[in-house]
Image: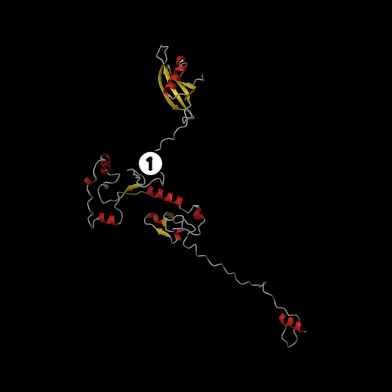
């Protein structure tokens, strides 16, 4: 039998020796041939001991069959208490469960998927809707909570929203696009800006090798709001960020002015010409005559 390991006290002698009883209980609970060697025992309390057996079943590497036995005070008969399969220190286990809200990544949503937002979402803050209460389809409204509880309610029973009075503050807010129950908070704006800057910002390899930044590109479509001072939308179908929000200091090889190549510079004429030939006379000039040039002297020599 393997060496015993203890928690707080010495294991009971009779319970520690009941290895065969524990093995029979493990083999009865498990499939035939999957209970391995006895690997350890642990004292759970007074006259209570748990025996551990190796599990040989495929897919349960490192798991152990744990059989707990016990005996009454002043009794010599050891009885079975519990049999269960438990993971060992090096057991192969599934990763820890992570809620879907924390597992979701950009691009995971598909057609028909819904992504509800929490009422206390840090990315959002209350906006102006023109009403004392948020709209009925808002996550922060009490009516939405009641509809969730009553899933069998028919759509025909829902009251239609009242029409906005013309000339009212709510009508002006609706025209300006302000009639929303919640809007982006400062935290939501900052997280979005950081995410866009990381993907299409001035520190990317594409921007570092670009001939110019997006702020001077004709394909940049301006956006409204406070983010317009740092971002825009790329409209170059051949660019790597077509249809994406890009930082103004981002850039790529598809810049609108990249095709206008500057003319090569023309060097200034040299002060001392060392390329053109110099004209030299073959003999000194006579008095009252025009000095001979090199071509004339060559011609005279040819007819002499």
Q: Position of residue 166 (x, y in %)?
A: 23, 57
- Quadrant of the frame with the C terminus: bottom right
- Name the residue: 44% across, 19% down: 24
Q: Is residue 160 above or below residue 282?
A: above
Q: Position of residue 290 (x, y in %)?
A: 71, 86
- Name the residue: 50% across, 54% down: 206
Which colouring convention does the figure follow? secondary structure
Label 1, residues with CA under 10 Å away: few <14, some 14-19, many ≥20: few
Is residue 205 something one can see in this rendering?
Answer: yes
Q: Position of residue 244 (x, y in %)?
A: 42, 54
How many dots with numbers? 1
- Name the residue: 41% across, 41% down: 103
Secondary structure at badge 1 equals helix
Residue 181 lies left or right of residue 230; in this view the side is: left
Q: Is residue 67 above or below residue 234?
A: above
Instruction: Looking at the picture, tell me which residue is in the foreground, 114 or 48.
Output: 114
Determine the image quadrant of residue 99. Answer: top left
**Which residue is under mark 1?**
101
Residue 185 lies left or right of residue 166; in this view the side is: right
Instruction: Looking at the picture, tell me which residue is in the foreground, 11 or 51.
Output: 51
Determine the residue located farthest toward the bottom in the rendered image. Answer: 288
Determine the residue located farthest toward the front in the rendered image. Answer: 32
Instruction: Looking at the picture, tell me which residue is in the foreground, 236 or 126.
Output: 236
Is residue 11 something one can see in this rendering?
Answer: no
Q: Position of residue 3 (x, y in %)?
A: 51, 20
């Amino acid at each position: 039998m393997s060496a015993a390991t203890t928690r707080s006290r010495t294991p009971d002698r009779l319970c520690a020796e009941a290895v065969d009883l524990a093995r029979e209980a493990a083999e009865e609970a498990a499939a035939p041939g999957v209970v391995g060697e006895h690997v350890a025992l642990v004292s759970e309390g007074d006259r209570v001991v748990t025996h551990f057996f190796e599990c040989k079943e495929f897919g349960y590497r490192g798991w152990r069959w744990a059989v707990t036995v016990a005996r009454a005070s002043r009794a010599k008969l050891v009885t079975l208490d519990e049999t269960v399969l438990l993971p060992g220190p090096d057991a192969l286990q599934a990763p820890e469960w992570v809620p879907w809200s924390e597992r979701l990544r950009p691009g995971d949503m598909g057609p028909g998927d819904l992504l509800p937002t929490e009422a206390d979402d840090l990315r959002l803050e209350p906006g102006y809707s023109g009403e004392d209460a948020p709209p009925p389809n808002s996550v922060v409204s009490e009516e939405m909570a009641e509809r969730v509880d009553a899933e069998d309610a028919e759509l025909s029973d829902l009251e239609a929203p009242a029409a906005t009075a013309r000339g009212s503050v709510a009508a002006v807010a609706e025209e300006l696009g302000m009639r929303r129950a919640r809007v982006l908070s400062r935290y939501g704006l900052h997280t979005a800006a950081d995410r866009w800057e990381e993907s299409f910002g001035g520190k990317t390899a594409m921007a570092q090798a670009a001939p110019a930044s997006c702020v001077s590109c004709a394909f940049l479509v301006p956006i409204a709001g406070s983010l317009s001072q740092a971002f825009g939308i790329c409209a170059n179908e051949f660019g790597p960020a077509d249809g994406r929000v890009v930082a103004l200091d981002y850039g790529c090889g598809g810049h609108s002015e990249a095709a206008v190549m500057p003319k090569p510079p023309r060097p200034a004429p040299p002060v001392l010409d060392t390329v053109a030939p110099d004209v030299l006379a073959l003999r000194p000039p006579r008095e009252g005559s025009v000095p001979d040039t090199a071509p004339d002297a060559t011609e005279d020599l040819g007819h002499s």
